[in-house]
């Protein structure tokens, strides 16, 4: 176990969201947790109760009753932090919760830092870094797919996969070391480039497959940045409102109504769509409209997906052709809106377009289906440990793969086996950083600082 600063302190924090509610929870962790709460608890003697039991009573400050509570006592090591943990469930008012927290602080506990409970779980060896990051992913999950991917990490599947990769590399390292240090051992297999190569190639292929899934994993976790682009008055705002199923953007017949970016978020088949309705693209003299159009150009650059909208009841113009050219290298869906009006557009110029009316629910469903197809999401229900959506983990996986590729290059060039071992060791260390076996104090501090207080 690695020891961090102030690990002997007993920490306390409010673990429930700020605001009024039915219940608030004040959580403590550390050697003095039970004694501290016992000193302000009127009820059973908490220092004599069995672990993982719940007790009714009152929190008192001298002779004054602060609140009627239930106190949960969980003794080490079978707790979230592997330390003694006490949770006070009180009434969910802001004032009363803070009164209890302040009282506990005066009795010797220290206010927990952001993420310190989970940090202690990591430092005490109950979870690895991938599980710690998955805790935050569970909290922030916005869809069923989000939650499923987070739970894969939380139960340790990613850790197991990485540990297996490292073990295969470690086996290679051990055999190389035996060959180098004890060449007289005739019973030991002679490690040559030909013997190593199949194992290294297999690992390289497996990591490559995981990295191929990373794009889908990030989409599942972060969503798709989608910009709705088109000339003024082609129905972009109506389309945004239809997809969001709410009146997010102002809709009028006046061209140029949308002068700034309008954003919204919706769930399409388990995937978050981060939608941006942009100002119509055209030559404009109005300074405000010009700024909106500049923001539209920036939105096109940043977007993962473009929904390019044309008007069924208007002929294509120079501005339309400019938009086709501007978005030709982007992933896009061409939508011809206002199908319910008289056709004036020449559809032969457009390729693979979707004809619809933003006022028809079935047409919007067709658009949602096309979005999933365009983003090649496939069946997102088959999520396993190979779906890694964490940017830090992906970066380390790429570094490990680069080392493995360097190793293969060395094998192909018949470099000495001890030289090849350097790249194998590097890959082993990069994989170790994913699960926290090779993590620095700075990394741990930065990672847990992103957590909320009380977690």
Image (tube, grey):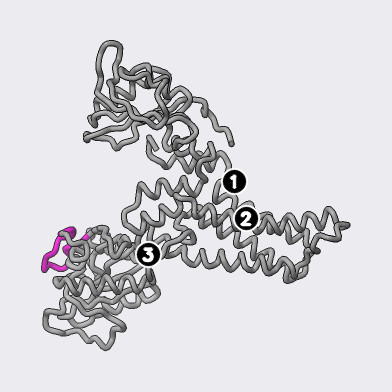
Q: CA distance from mark 3 to mark 2?
A: 28 Å
Q: Residue at x 15, y 80 (%)?
A: 313
For the residue pair 16 and 243, the one nearer the viewer reads as 16
Q: Is residue 30 magenta?
A: no
Q: Quadrant of residue 324?
A: bottom left
x then y, percent, for residue 361? 16, 71
Among the two numbered marks 1 and 2 on one chain, the one whose residue lies closer to the N terminus = 2
Q: Label 3 belongs to which residue?
A: 381
User: How many residues crowd around disc 3 within 10 Å: few (fewer than 14), some, or many (20 or more)?
Assistant: few
User: How many residues crowd around disc 1 within 10 Å: few (fewer than 14), some, or many (20 or more)?
Assistant: few
x then y, percent, for residue 225? 34, 62
Q: Which mark is residue 166?
A: 2
| Left or right placement of residue 203 versus residue 367 in this view | right
Residues at discs 3 and 1 in contact (Cβ within 8 Å): no
Residue 446, placed above or below residue 30: below
Q: Residue at x 29, y 79 (%)?
A: 321
x then y, percent, for residue 383? 42, 62
Q: Secondary structure at mark 1?
A: loop
| Left or right placement of residue 288 versus residue 137 in this view | left
Q: Label 1 belongs to which residue?
A: 437
Among the two numbered marks 3 and 2 on one chain, the one whose residue lies closer to the N terminus = 2
Residues at discs 3 and 2 in contact (Cβ within 8 Å): no
For the residue pair 347 and 264, the one nearer the viewer reads as 264
Q: Secondary structure at mark 2?
A: helix
Residue 65, placed above or below residue 399: above
Q: Quadrant of the N terminus?
A: top right
Q: CA distance from mark 3 to mark 1?
A: 31 Å
Give the extent of the magenta segment. Answer: 247-259
């Amino acid at each position: 176990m690695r020891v961090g600063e102030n690990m002997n302190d007993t920490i306390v924090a409010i673990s429930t969201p700020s605001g009024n509610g039915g219940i608030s929870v004040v959580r403590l962790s550390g050697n003095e947790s039970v004694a501290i709460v016992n000193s302000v608890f009127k009820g059973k003697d908490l220092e004599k109760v069995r672990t993982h039991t719940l007790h009714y009573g009152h929190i008192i400050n001298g002779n004054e009753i602060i609140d009627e509570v239930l106190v949960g006592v969980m003794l080490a090591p079978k707790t979230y932090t592997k330390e003694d943990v006490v949770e006070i469930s009180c009434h969910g008012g802001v004032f009363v919760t803070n009164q209890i927290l302040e009282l506990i602080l005066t009795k010797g506990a220290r206010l927990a830092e952001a993420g310190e409970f989970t940090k202690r779980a990591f430092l005490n060896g109950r979870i690895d870094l991938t599980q710690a990051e998955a805790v935050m992913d569970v909290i922030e999950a916005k869809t069923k797919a989000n939650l499923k991917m987070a739970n894969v990490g939380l139960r340790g599947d990613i850790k197991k996969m990485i540990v297996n990769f490292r073990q295969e590399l470690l086996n290679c390292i051990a055999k190389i070391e035996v060959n180098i240090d004890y060449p007289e051992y005739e019973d030991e297999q002679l490690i040559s480039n030909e013997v190593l190569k199949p194992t290294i190639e297999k690992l390289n292929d497996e990591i490559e497959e995981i990295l191929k899934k990373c794009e889908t994993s990030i989409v599942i976790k972060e969503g798709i940045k989608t910009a709705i682009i088109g000339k003024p008055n082609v129905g972009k705002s109506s389309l945004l409102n239809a997809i969001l199923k709410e009146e997010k953007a102002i809709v009028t017949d006046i061209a140029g109504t949308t002068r700034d970016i309008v954003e919204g978020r919706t769930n399409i088949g388990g995937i978050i769509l981060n939608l941006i309705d942009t100002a119509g693209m055209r030559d404009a003299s109005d300074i405000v409209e010009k700024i909106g159009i500049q923001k539209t150009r920036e939105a096109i650059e940043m977007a993962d997906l473009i929904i390019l909208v044309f008007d069924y009841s208007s002929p294509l113009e120079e501005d339309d052709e400019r938009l086709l050219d501007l978005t030709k290298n982007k992933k896009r869906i061409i939508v011809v809106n206002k199908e319910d009006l008289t056709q004036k557009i020449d559809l032969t110029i457009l390729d693979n377009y979707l004809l619809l009316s933003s006022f028809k629910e079935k047409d919007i469903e067709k658009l949602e289906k096309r979005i999933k197809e365009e983003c090649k999401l496939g069946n997102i229900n088959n999520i396993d440990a190979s779906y890694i959506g964490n940017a830090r983990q992906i970066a380390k996986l790429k570094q490990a793969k680069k080392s493995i590729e360097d190793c293969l290059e060395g094998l192909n060039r018949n470099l000495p086996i001890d030289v090849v071992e350097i790249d194998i060791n590097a890959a082993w260390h990069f994989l170790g950083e994913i699960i926290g076996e090779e993590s620095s104090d700075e990394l741990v501090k930065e990672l847990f600082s992103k957590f909320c207080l009380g977690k």
